[in-house]
Image (cartoon, rainbow, N blue to C red):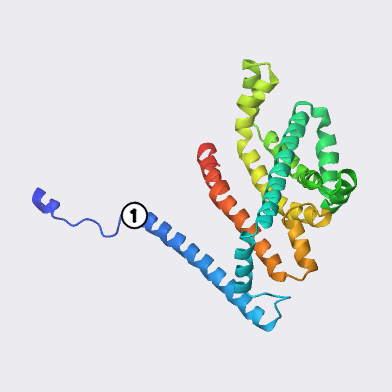
Amino acid sequence: MVTVDERAEVPPAEGRPRSRMIATQRVADVTARRLGVVAFLVVVAATWQICSEFFPPVLIPSPARVANRFITLWSNPGFLLYARATVIHVLASVSIAFVLGLAIALFAHFFKSFQPAVYQRLAPFLNAFPGIGWAFLALVWFGINSESVIFSAAAALLPLAIINIGAGLRELNPEMTEMAVSFSRQAPRRIRLVMLPMMFPYMFATVRLCFGVSWQIVLIVELLCGAPGLGSVISVARQRYWTDMIFAVVVLILLIVFVVDRVIFTRLQYKIGKAYNV
């Protein structure tokens, strides 16, 4: 028979608590992912350096040459103005496309008879229309200026906004919308207090998608229209065979998109996931 004292001296079960094991496994997974990213970057940099030794700088400049050009560009006030112009073009085109897409999707939601016209005619037409076509039309209509770039990029992003926001409207809880009607007959009030908060994850995904795609469209339009921006910097570098400048501009765009996505969008997505359980 085991006494109380003897039971107290029995050693606990071997092994760490489950919570500690999970935390340790999570840290190991994060470390493995970071090491994988570092290894990938090292491989890319090494491959780039090796290729630059076998090809002339006009084809593949070395990483050191591109880094030197990147640092030199930041000391040029004119380049900073062109970079700011591109950022303004991106933000303006994303904002216009998002607002117009939200308005069109809400219009089709409240007037059901227009849904086939919006989702089966307008959205497919805008989605199929090439961005280069919008660029040339804007060049004819507005000339060589920032308005042409913003119009072309917004027109190319508009179908993405309509389709994504429309998907969010179709996923709304019908019981919640019916209850909102019973509390208020004013459509703007229901939209502001009930529908938009429920659609926030979809609207956030729309903004994040449009922001990433807009850089591609804006650069192409600036390159074609000759409007102030990084696209025109790339055009000048192409004409003068400054390949290292082209690489430096591309690296700058990659850094901007990566930092904004990780610092702003990723944190917001984490908070949205906790708030909406998505």
Residue with the most extreme bottom position? 54
Q: How crowded is mark 1: few (under 14 residues within 10 Å), some or many (20 or more)?
A: few
Q: Quadrant of the C terminus?
A: top right
Q: Position of residue 36 (x, y in %)?
A: 51, 67
Residue at image location 64% in from the left, 46% down from the top: 208
Q: In this view, does 149 lie above or below 74?
A: above
Q: Position of residue 45 (x, y in %)?
A: 59, 73
Q: Which sits in the foreground, 111 or 212?
A: 212
Query: Quadrant of the rendered structure where residue 73 is?
Result: bottom right
Give the residue number, with chain letter if any, for mark 1.
20
Whether residue 139 appears in this view of the structure is yes
Amino acid type indicated by mark 1: Arg
Q: Position of residue 215 (x, y in %)?
A: 71, 53
Q: Where is residue 271 in the image (x, y as percent from the top left)?
A: 51, 41
Q: Which sits in the foreground, 89 or 114?
A: 89
Q: Is residue 109 above or below residue 257?
A: above
